[in-house]
Amino acid sequence: MIQSNNIIKTIGEKMILRGMNLEIASGETVAIIGPNGAGKSTWLKITAGLLKPTEGSLLIDEEPLKKDKYELQQIIGYLGHQSFLYEHFSPVENLRFFAKLYHVKKPDKRIDDLIEEVGLTFFKYEPVRSFSRGMIQRLAIARAILHDPKILLLDEPHTGLDQQAVDILNKVILRLKKKGVTVVLVTHDFPQVIKTCDRVIILKNGRVKDDIPLEGQDVNWLYTHYERQAIHS
Amino acid sequence: MKNLLLPALVIAGKDLYSEWKTRQIVTTMLIFSSLIIVTFSFAFDPSNQSVRVLIPGMIWIITIFAAILGLNRSFTTEQSNDHIHAFVVAPIDASSVFLGKFIANFIFVLIVQIIAIPLLFLLFDFRVLTIESIFYLVGIIFLGTFGFVSVGTFLAALSSNSKSSEMLLPILLLPLATPVVIAAVQATRIVLIDLEKLSSAMSWMQLMIAYDLIFFVAGLLLFEYVLEV
Ligand SMILES: Nc1ncnc2c1ncn2[C@@H]1O[C@H](COP(=O)(O)OP(=O)(O)O)[C@@H](O)[C@H]1O
Ligand SMILES: [Mg+2]
C-alpha cells in the first residue's frame, strides 16, 4: 500500500531523512515512534503529498504520488500538527466545506454521524474559535476521516486530548482498522500504540532504526525496547 | 472539470459565505471608498462641472485600494491553520485555488464598485451619462478589475508567505499592474469625458483584454509553484 524507497529529504543544508526504506501493507496499523527531530513528521508529510522527496520515491498502490494524482489524494486522510479548520466556522460548516472538496456523497448524514462519533454534537453550531485544544483535535480527526480514506496518516493525534477523547480516538482507529483502512500513527504515546497498532517502527536520525511486530507485547516491553534502540545506541 | 471548476466554486463559495458571516472585508472596503469620495467632494467643489475630470481617476483609486485591502486578507486568512496545506493534499488542482480566490476577490471588489461608483456620480452631480457611455463604462470597469484582480490574486498568494506580506503586495503590484491601470484610466476618461474619441478607448480596451488573458492564464498555470511547500 505504502512504499517508501530510499527517501532522502534535505531542506536547505540539513538532511532530514537519510534513506527511509519502509513498506506498509494494506490494512496494517503502524506506529512510528522516535525522538524529536527524527524526521517522523517530515516523512508523513511526504507520504501525504505535502512535501516532495529530494531523492527516492514514495509509492501508494504502486503509483508515485504526484500533484495531479487525484485518485490517490482522494484515498488519503491526513492529520498534521495543524487542524486545517476555519476558526469562525462551526464544525458543521467546516466539515461541509471539506466534504465538497472531497466530493463526499450524502454529506449531511455523514457529517452528523462523524460529529456524534467524536462527541461534539452539543457544539455542532458553535464557532470553532471558542473550542478547547482537545475539541479542535476531535473535529480535526473527523475532518481527516470525512471522505472515507483508505489510508489514514495521523501526526501525534493524541496530544492535547483528555482521557475520554483518547478513548474516542482509539475507537475510531480500531473501527477503521476493522474496515481494512491502513493507519500510520506518529506518536509518543506508548499505551495508545499498544492498544491500537500491529507494528511499530522506530525512527532515528532520518532512518528506520527498528521495525517490529507488536503482537502480544505490552507497554513496559515497548518502553525498554525503545530506550535500548533509540536512546542508548 | 471535477478537479478545477468545482473546487474553485467551493473555495469561492467558502470565502463569500465567510464574508457574509463576518462582513469584515467588504465593510472595510466600503468605508475606505466612502472616505475617498467624501474627501474629494470637500476638496473640490462638486457643483463645478470642470471637476468631473477627476472622476475617472477616482473610480480607479477606489478600485485599486479596495482590491488591495481584500487581496491582503485573501491568503493570510488561509494561514492560521495551514489551510493552504489542506488544499495541497486535497484532490483538487492547484489552479482551482487561484480560480476560487480570484472569483471571491473579484466579487468583493464588484460589490464595492456597484455601491461606490453610483455614489460618486451622485455626489459629483455627474449627469452627462448616456446609455452608450454607461455600456462602455461597465465593460471597461469589468476588464480593468479583471486584470488587476488576476495579477493581485497571484501576487497576494506569492507574498503571503512573507512576514511583511502587507508591504510586499503593493510593491510587487506597482510594476506589474501599472499597464492595466493606465489603460483603464485612459479608457474611462475617454468614455466619460470625450466620447468622440471612442476608437482610442477601443484600443485601450484591446490592451486590457490582452493583459487580462495573459495574466489570468499565467496565474492559473503558475499557481502550483506558488503552493509548493
Ligand atoms: N521546513 C523546515 N526547514 C528546516 N528544517 C526543518 C523543516 N522542517 C523540519 N525541519 C527539521 O527537520 C528535523 C525533523 O523534523 P520533523 O520531521 O518535524 O521531526 P519529528 O516529527 O520526528 O519530531 C528537525 O530537526 C527539524 O528542525
Ligand atoms: Mg513531529
Image (tube, grey):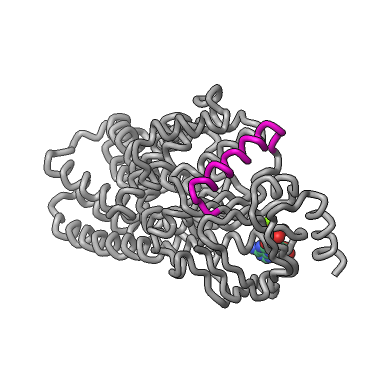
Answer with left or right where residue B166 lies relative to residue A201.
left
Residue B77 drawn at (x, y percent) = 52, 44
Answer with left or right where residue B196 lies relative to residue A91.
left
Question: Residue at image x 14%, y 55%?
Answer: B198
The quarter of the image that holds ligand 1 is bottom right
Answer with left or right where residue A119 lies relative to residue A216.
left
Residue B31 drawn at (x, y percent) = 45, 32
Q: Is residue A169 magenta?
A: yes
Residue B226 drawn at (x, y percent) = 47, 62
Residue B116 drawn at (x, y percent) = 34, 35
Viewer-nearest residue: B202 or B26 = B26
Question: Residue at image x 70%, y 43%?
Answer: A159
Viewer-nearest residue: B72 or A203 = A203
Quadrant of res A35 = bottom right
Quadrant of res B55 = top left
- Magenta region's main secondary structure? helix
* Residue found farthest to the top: A122
Q: Is residue A50 visible?
A: no
The C terminus of chain A, quarter of image: bottom right
The part of the chain drawn in magenta is A161-182
Q: Is residue B148 above or below residue B47?
A: below
Q: Give the mark count.
A: 0
Q: Is residue A180 magenta?
A: yes
Q: Is residue A42 visible?
A: yes
Question: Residue at image x 51%, y 62%?
Answer: A49
Quadrant of res A74 = bottom left
